[in-house]
C-alpha cells in the first residue's frame, strides 16, 4: 500500500516535471540536453519560441566536423517596422552550446547568413531568430558527423 | 598579421541588395584540445566581427569556439550610398584586424 502511494507520488511528480519541460523546451520532440536549454533561455528569456519561418541549411552528412557549412535565413521583409534583429545558433552536444550570434537590422536587406561551424558529434543544430516584434522562431537540422571536431586534429 | 579577405561588389545600383563575403586566417583554438604532452592548449579565438557601412553598423557576429578555423561569413546589405565598408575582427590575446572596401552606388 505504502509502495503504491510512493509510486503514484513519483509518477505525479514526473508528470509535473514533464509538463513543465514541455512549456520551456524549444523542440519538445528532441531530447535537448540541459546545457543547450540554459543557453537558449539566456537568449530568449521567458518568451515563447515557435517553430518555423527560419530556414537552416546544413549538410545531412558531414565527413569533417571541423568545418561544416551552415546557412541560415529568415523570411522577412526587412523593413524598419518588421525585420530580424538577431539569429542565434546552438548545438546540443558540443562542449559549449553556443555557436554564434548574428545581429542585424533593416539595413541588411535580407536576413541570410552563411558561415562554417565545428561539430563535436552527430547531433541536432538549432537556429533561433529574434524578430523586431519580439517574437522568436526556430528551426533545427540533424547532422551526421564522421570525423568529430575538438578531438582530432584538423 | 592576420590575412583578411573581403569580397564586396565594386559598383551597385541604389537600393540593390549586395552580398558581402569575408574570410580571415585565424586558428580559432577552442581551448578544449590538449597537446601531445597532455597539457591543455589555451583558448585563442576571434570573439567579435563587426561590419560598418559609412560608420553605421550593419552586421555583427559574436563568435564562440564552435566557429571553424579561418572564420568565413556571407551576409548582405542594401547599397544606399557610395562609401566605405569597414570590417573589424577582435578576439583573445589582444587580436585585432581591420579591412575596408570601397563601393560606388549609382
Image (spheres, coloured by chain):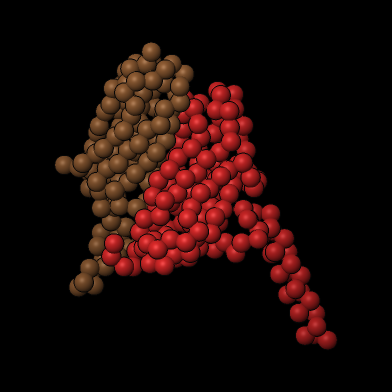
Chain colours: A red, B brown
**Residue that sits furthest to the left in the current view:** B1
Give percent across and percent down for residue A53.
62, 41
When the figure is inspected, residue B92 is found, relative to residue A149, above or below; the finding is: above
Instruction: Reply above or below: A89 against A80.
Output: below
Horizontal side of A21 relative to A11 (left or right) equals left
Looking at the picture, how far across and down is residue A45, in whole percent? 58, 45
Q: Is residue B86 visible?
A: yes
| Residue at the outermost top position | B106
Most foreground residue, A51 or B101: B101
**Quarter of the image containing the C terminus of chain B?**
top left
Residue B71 at what x, y percent from top left?
32, 46
Residue located 54% across and 34% down the image: A84
- Taking the image as shown, residue A124 lies to the left or right of residue B44, namely right
Q: Nearer the viewer, residue A121 or B16?
A: B16
> Residue at coordinates 34% horizontally, 44% vertically from top-left?
B72
Q: Residue at x 72, y 60 (%)?
A: A19
Quadrant of the rendered image containing residue A121: bottom left
Amino acid at each position: 500500500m505504502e509502495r503504491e502511494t510512493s509510486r503514484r507520488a513519483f509518477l505525479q511528480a514526473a508528470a509535473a516535471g514533464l509538463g513543465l519541460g514541455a512549456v520551456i523546451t524549444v523542440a519538445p520532440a528532441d531530447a535537448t540536453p540541459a546545457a543547450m536549454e540554459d543557453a537558449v533561455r539566456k537568449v530568449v528569456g521567458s518568451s515563447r519560441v515557435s517553430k518555423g519561418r527560419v530556414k537552416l541549411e546544413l549538410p545531412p552528412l558531414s565527413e569533417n566536423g571541423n568545418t561544416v557549412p551552415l546557412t541560415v535565413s529568415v523570411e522577412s521583409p526587412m523593413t524598419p517596422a518588421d525585420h530580424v534583429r538577431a539569429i542565434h545558433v546552438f548545438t546540443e552536444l558540443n562542449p559549449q552550446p553556443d555557436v554564434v550570434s548574428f545581429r542585424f537590422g533593416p539595413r541588411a536587406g535580407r536576413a541570410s547568413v552563411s558561415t562554417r561551424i565545428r561539430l563535436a558529434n552527430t547531433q541536432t543544430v538549432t537556429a533561433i531568430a529574434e524578430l523586431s516584434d519580439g517574437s522568436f522562431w526556430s528551426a533545427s537540422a540533424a547532422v551526421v558527423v564522421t570525423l568529430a571536431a575538438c578531438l582530432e586534429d584538423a | 598579421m592576420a590575412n583578411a579577405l573581403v569580397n564586396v561588389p565594386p559598383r551597385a545600383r541604389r537600393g540593390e541588395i549586395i552580398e558581402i563575403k569575408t574570410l580571415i586566417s585565424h586558428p580559432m583554438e577552442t581551448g578544449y584540445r590538449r597537446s601531445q604532452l597532455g597539457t591543455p592548449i589555451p583558448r585563442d579565438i576571434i570573439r567579435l566581427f563587426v561590419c560598418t557601412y559609412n560608420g553605421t553598423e550593419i552586421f555583427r557576429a559574436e563568435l564562440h569556439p564552435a566557429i571553424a578555423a579561418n572564420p568565413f561569413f556571407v551576409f548582405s546589405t542594401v547599397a544606399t550610398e557610395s562609401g566605405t565598408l569597414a570590417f573589424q575582427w577582435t578576439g583573445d590575446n589582444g587580436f585585432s584586424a581591420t579591412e575596408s572596401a570601397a563601393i560606388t552606388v549609382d
